[in-house]
Image (cartoon, grey):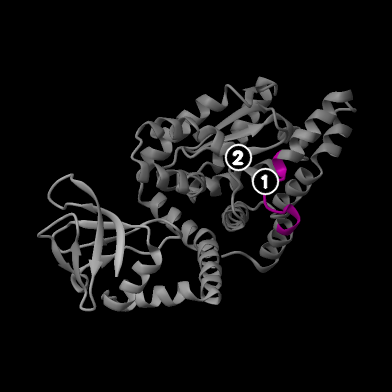
Amino acid sequence: MILNGRFFAGQSSQVVETTCDTDDLGNVQFRHLPGQHFNLRDAHFSPAMGQHPRQITFADGSMFQSRDLAALAQLEKQFAKKTGVMTLVDKIESYWRWVLLSVVSLVVCTVLFFKFALPALSSLIANQLPLTVDRQLGQQMQSSLDEWPLAASEIPQDEQARLSALFAPYLQNDAGFEYKILFRKFALGPNAFALPDGSIIFCDDLIHLAQNDEQLIAVLQHEMGHVQARHSLRGIIQSSFVYWLLLIYSGDVSMVSESVAALPYMLMNLSYSRAMETEADELAIRHLQANGIAVHNLADILQRLENADELLEEKEVKQTQQGDKTKSRWLDYISTHPATDERIKHIQQLAADGVK
């Protein structure tokens, strides 16, 4: 059998356009390279990839490349030594049903990885990191968020002092976290969220929305649950996992500074999983029950958050177009969070059963 192609010498950069002759025993001779003798039984054939040229690599490192794919396939079938794995791969590639099954299996495995394995891996990584990581992230995020979307709170100073005193007895120093209460005006509507270092931010609209102090304490306990479980750090690791894989693969260290700069934005777009929200709710319920505060306050404030636009419009006596702008921004933000109705029902069920 005769094939045309290029010969690459294994010990130099020499490339020669040549013709390859093979006999029935697998012996190979190159017409333009006298003295070069090989046997295909000791060679390695590169995998077939569409119409791309294939290579035969010989024992001394030299290589022959050709676009005569049909002839190469015939020689490979006749002389190449294949492992059980490669034989299986060839069979799979030969039948479209196996190819389809492989694609479906890949999709299923990918979904399972991101749904179950990645959250578990992120939790494992987060729990192995020292608390100094949380503190550094929290400080950097607060500085960036204070530029936007956070602004100075418009809650009167005496009311801020009263709420700080109200919250103080509940700020347990769990696992080394140092909780700090911050009041800010939030451009995206009523909310409260926790930074990794234990800073818990109450936004003005949420304080206006709450009917009583117990609802605000319930929010505090919920956000403390996120801190204790290190949900922010876990979420950041999880959401940036693919990004960091690309960084490791590419070796581009300049991407590190870009990823750190994006952390505040990542936090604002972080949607806690239902498992995380449930975990934070359960921690909050335990603390509420331990402090003699009715658990329904947590469900009540969640329900008010669900109806935040209408309630705030009523309380603020319809502030013309500004209310409509707030509403559209809030709906965009809340759409990234788990279904509130389901959380409320779950909290009510936990309260009825008693969380241990």
In this view, the residue in front, 169 or 118, is 118
- Answer left or right for 160 relative to 131: right
**Residue 213 visible (yes or no):** no
Q: Which residue is mark 1?
A: 336
Residue positioned 49% across, 44% down in the render: 236
Residue positioned 71% across, 43% down in the render: 334
Magenta span: 333-342
Q: Residues within 10 Å of mark 2 (few under 14, many from 20)?
A: few
Q: How far across and how far down the image is residue 76, in percent?
A: 31, 72
Residue positioned 70% across, 21% down in the render: 154
The numbered disc on residue 269 is 2
Where does the N terminus fall, quadrant-wise? Answer: bottom left
Magenta-drawn stretch contains 337:
yes
| Kind of residue at badge 2 | Asn
State whether residue 151 is above or below residue 178. above
In this view, the residue in front, 128 or 91, is 91
